[in-house]
Image (spheres, grey):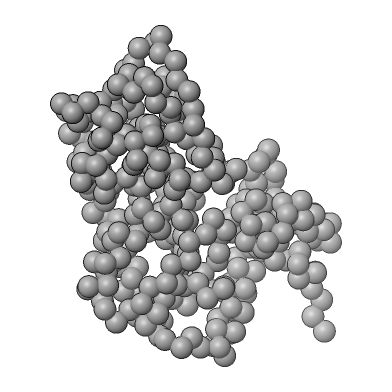
């Protein structure tokens, strides 16, 4: 008989180690952060070994944790593949991608028509959620995650974004495609509340500190619970918005929105996460190749735009 620690404790450790975050592990397992911490401490007590170094809100694997994590990760991958093998999906040309609502709506969906035209036999399902879903579970083949790129495989990083201030062209001075923040004295600054507490979001205060503006100007904030709502509000002219340049790329190129003169604050990375068995499915490989190509085009365009502004 195999002598194993409680399965819930093993799952909690594996998820926390994979995400390097108790918060993200809790979201994936649909339990509280306290529950994940309790399960990990239970496992540490059974093993009489410390598996994580806890540093405030961040965690890092100890040498003992690093030793067992790859074995557990591979074991869970094999379990997922075993069940996928006895429950084959109906269409081998169908794939499911999990990503955030904002990225799906603003960056991915506008580009899907190109993919469908190129590969009409592949059907793409989008699971837009703020939950962290691991490929190989819940029918998900791929995931695009947003966060720090520290420790990520370079090939997994699609691109990193920047945070810029933008406004609808309808409320910008008609003779100026590079408005200043002082051009919007009667409009609130739009902002949204972040769903991921482990990331320190770029803020208007940081942007205003470096932007050319009148120091006597007073600004008020208008908060939205969802990022997509704030983007829609900005498009309709409610006020300027500080947001990811990736999510307003189409609008800036079309001229329906303009970038407000000021800094580009560092953002985070969009990473493509693949399951362990995706290499055996041609549809998934085709889609990931297309995603990387689109991401490379966006990176090149963004770099050219930054260089032109710097000049």
Location of residue 188 (image quadrant): top left
| Labels in figure, total | 0
Q: Which residue: 62% across, 61% down?
A: 28
- Residue 236 lies left or right of residue 203; in this view the side is left
Whether 109 is drawn above or below 223: the answer is below
Locate residue 123, reporting x and y percent.
36, 77
Q: Which residue: 26% across, 76% down?
A: 119
Say whether residue 292 is visible: no
Say whether residue 195 is visible: yes
- Residue 61 lies left or right of residue 93; in this view the side is right
Foreground pick, 94 / 175: 175
Location of residue 133 (image quadrant): bottom right
Whether 45 is drawn above or below 290: the answer is above
Locate residue 54, reporting x and y percent.
70, 43
Point out the image quarter for the N terminus.
bottom right
Foreground pick, 228 / 6: 228
Q: Which residue: 24% across, 66% down?
A: 114
Q: Which residue: 39% across, 45% down?
A: 232
Foreground pick, 232 / 193: 232
Whether 7 is drawn above or below 189: the answer is below
């Amino acid at each position: 008989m195999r002598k194993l620690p409680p399965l819930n404790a093993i799952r909690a450790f594996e998820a926390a180690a994979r995400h390097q975050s108790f918060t993200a592990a809790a979201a994936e397992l649909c339990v509280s952060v306290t529950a994940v911490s309790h399960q990990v401490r239970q496992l540490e007590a059974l093993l009489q070994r410390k598996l994580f170094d806890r540093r405030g809100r961040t965690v890092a694997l100890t040498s003992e944790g690093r030793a067992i994590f790859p074995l557990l990760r591979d074991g869970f991958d094999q379990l997922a593949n075993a069940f996928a093998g006895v429950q084959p999906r109906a269409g081998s040309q169908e794939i499911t991608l999990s990503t955030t609502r904002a990225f799906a709506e603003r960056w991915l969906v506008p580009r899907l028509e190109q993919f469908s035209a190129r590969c009409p036999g592949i059907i793409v399902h989008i699971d837009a959620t703020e939950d962290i879903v691991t490929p190989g579970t819940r029918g998900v083949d791929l995931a695009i995650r947003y966060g720090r790129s520290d420790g990520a495989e370079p090939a997994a990083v699609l691109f990193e974004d920047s945070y810029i201030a933008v406004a609808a062209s309808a409320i910008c001075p008609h003779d100026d495609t590079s408005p200043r923040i002082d051009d919007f004295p009667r409009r609130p600054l739009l902002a949204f509340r972040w769903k991921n507490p482990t990331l320190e979001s770029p803020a208007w205060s940081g942007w205003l500190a470096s932007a050319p503006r009148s120091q006597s100007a007073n600004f008020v904030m208008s908060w939205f619970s969802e990022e997509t709502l704030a983007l829609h509000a900005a498009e309709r002219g409610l006020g300027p918005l500080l947001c990811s340049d990736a999510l307003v790329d189409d609008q800036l190129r079309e001229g329906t929105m303009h970038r407000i003169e000021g800094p580009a604050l560092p953002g985070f990375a969009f990473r493509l996460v693949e399951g362990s068995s995706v290499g055996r499915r041609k549809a998934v490989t085709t889609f990931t190749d297309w995603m990387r190509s689109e991401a490379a085009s966006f990176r090149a365009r963004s770099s050219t735009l930054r260089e032109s502004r710097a000049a």
